[in-house]
Structures are given as C-alpha cells and as structure tokens.
Image: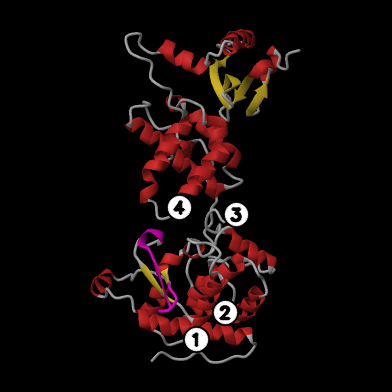
Amino acid sequence: MSKLTQSFVRTIEKPGSYHDERGLILRVSALGTKKWLLRYQLNNRRHDLGLGAFPAVSLKAARLAVDTYRLDLSQGIDPLSKRALLDAPQTLPAPAVVTFRIEAERYIKTHRQSWKNARHAQQWSHTLRDHVYPLLGDMPVACVDTEHVLDVLTPIWNNIPETAFRLRNRMELVLDAAKARKLREGENPARWRGHLDKLLPRQKRAKMPFSAMPAEEVGPFIRRLDSLASTAARACELLIYTACRSSEVCDARWSELDLAAGLWTIDALRMKAGKTHRVPLCPGAIQVLTQQRGKHPLYVFPNARHSASLPGNALRRVMQQLQASEFVPHGFRSTFRTWAAENTLFPREVCEMALAHSLEDKVEAAYNRGDLLEKRRQLMSAWAAYIQAGASEVFNPCPEPD
C-alpha cells in the first residue's frame, strides 16, 4: 500500500522529506514549495532524480514516472545519465554530468595548496560530507537552486550557527567556481548579501573572549597534566610552555625542531600570519618533546591511529578530563600575555612577538624586521620558571629582563 495520499500531498506544509513507495519522495522546502524526487541506488551510490514540482506533477504522475525509471534501472540504465543525454543537443556528444560533490572535491583539490594547513581542507571536506552531500552530493551542480541551499542550511542555522555560516560560504565558492567553468548559469543561490540574508534569520553570534585560566592556576594544572600518560596531555603541556596556537602544536613535525639549539621553527604555511615563526624552547618544553621521540617519524603528536597529527579537540578533551572544561586551550595565550604584562618588565613588542602577533604600527614593522629571539627566550624562560614554581606550590618573583 502507498504511504502518501493526494490529500496529504496537497495540505502538508511542514518542511521535510516524505516517502512514498519505490523510492518516491515528496520534499517540502522551507519556502513551502513541493518537489518530487526519485531516490535510487546504483553502483553502491545513492542518487536523487528530480521529477518535477507539485501540483504541476500530481502524485499519480510521479508514481508513473517512478515506474518508468525503475524499468530503466532493471536494465542497467542510469536515469540521470539518460535524462542528460535526452536533454543535450543531438548534434553534440552528451557531456558527463558534473555533480555538486565532484565540483566541490575539485575545488578543494585546486585550492588546498594555498590554504595554511591541512586541517582547513579537512574542515571543508567534513562539513560538506556531513551537511551537504546527503542532500546535494549527487545532484548536477547546474541544478542547485535557492531551495536546495535552504534545505541544507535551515536545520543547522540556529543550532550550530558558526558551522552553518561557514558552510554557506563554502557552497557559494563551489557554485561560483562551477559558473566560471561554465557548468551553471544565473545568480549564485548561496549568495548572502541581497539574497539569503532576506530568507534566513540573522544569527546571534556574540563574540566572547576565550575563557582563560588564571596564571596562578597554571602551575598546579601542569602538575596534573604530568600525571597523564596521553599524547594529548604532552601536547597541552607544550602549548602552555610555548604560548602557541593549538593547530601549531598539534601539527608539529620533527623536521621543524632543533632540540640541541632549543629552537622550533614553524613554517609560514602553518602560521596564521603567513610568516615563519621561531619559538625558543625552555627546558620544560624540551623535556615534553623528548618524551615523544620514537612515536611517529613525521608528527610529534600523532593521533590514536598514527595516521595523521593529533586533532585539535583532543586538547579540549584533556582539559575536560582534568575538570578544567570552563577554560579553552587557546585561552593559555591570553593567560601568558596577561601574566607578562602584569608580572614582568619585558617590552610590549617582545611579548607580542612571542605570540606571533604582527606589530600594529606599520612603519615600525617596516623597520623592525628582527624577531627578538634571544629576548623572547628570556621571556619564555621566565614564564616556565613561574609555571614550575606554581607546580611546586612555591611562589618566586618573575625575573626582570637583562
């Protein structure tokens, strides 16, 4: 017996997908429009074939179309490929159908080299895989319209706003690239200004500062970290001792390190500012790195499968394990900067360069092209001494710079 009725199809208004028999689906968009789809499996992949909109295509007509396409499938004929062949000019060979998935993967491959680190490409791939491909992955990129974009974004727009907004931008870039390659025409349905900003509610994305652990709690926290044997705990220790970003620590490579010289040189491609950054290593940081020797030939902090570097959320999980979930790993940079300002006499530019921040004064930056490595080494040694004093519950004043 069929699952849908004519009265149901006519009256349903709630957005969603409603299944009939043999793969027929009625999709109701956030705008209230209703379209028919045939969902089928071919060569172990799922495909969605549009059958037209209701009421122009009735329930009965949609079922008859499904019967026709199911007959093609029983003979090994792909309905999507057949439609593309019939729609193409008869004097020209039928072009291959380029799906949104194919175009998105081409975009990622093309631009991967210009992105600062591999994690950015992973974020692209994972968000598209989780939120876009289930709905649009096998759809011809030329057919993606505003309703399809809204079907992707509406369920996550308010629940995970940051991901939703980034995902909208990624869809826009993929569709722009498709238009540039003459795979589609018309306006970009994922465009924000003057288009989706009129169809989606404004997100409330208040910018809050990263929650930072007070400096006096860092020493005892390091002592608790030292009690854990995990790779993530060692990475968190290095992050604290060096005041580096999570991505810089988690993706650290042995080729960047000179432990004899106490120096870590991070390639410009891995830095937020796009500049090579030299990090002086205090004895505590060197001890952490020494403990990681032999665990992976490339990465200092490999993941559990030893197939790649440690994921960034591993540091947050360690903090949760130690009941410090009210703070975030990135907040240790703020902790360090506040401590340096309030407890030492090191110049501001030394403290900022320790965080790999660019000088705000462009003229000053143009003339000052050094990285103040030795002065930063003194600063980081003072920071390490402060941490270790806190770890032993003994307070020692921070030394002043030479």
Q: Which residue is mark 2?
A: 215
Which amino acid type is shown beneath numbered disc 1?
Asn
Of badges 1 and 4, the one in the foreground is 4
For numbered disc 1, what is the local secondary structure? Answer: helix
Horizontal side, residue 235 vs residue 259: left or right: right
Separation (CA) of disc 3 from disc 1? 42 Å
For numbered disc 4, what is the local secondary structure? Answer: helix
Which amino acid type is shown beneath numbered disc 4?
Ala
Kindly indicate the quadrant of the structure image that contains residue 347: bottom left
Horizontal side, residue 374 vs residue 147: left or right: left
Which residue appears at 28% of the width and 71% of the height? 365
Separation (CA) of disc 4 from disc 3? 17 Å
Q: Which residue is mark 1?
A: 343
Q: Report crowding for label 2: few under 14, some 14 to 19, many 20 or more residues within 10 A (C-alpha).
A: some
Which residue appears at 38% of the width and 13% of the height? 88
Counting residues from the N terminus, which is met first, the one under dot 2 or under dot 3?
A: 2
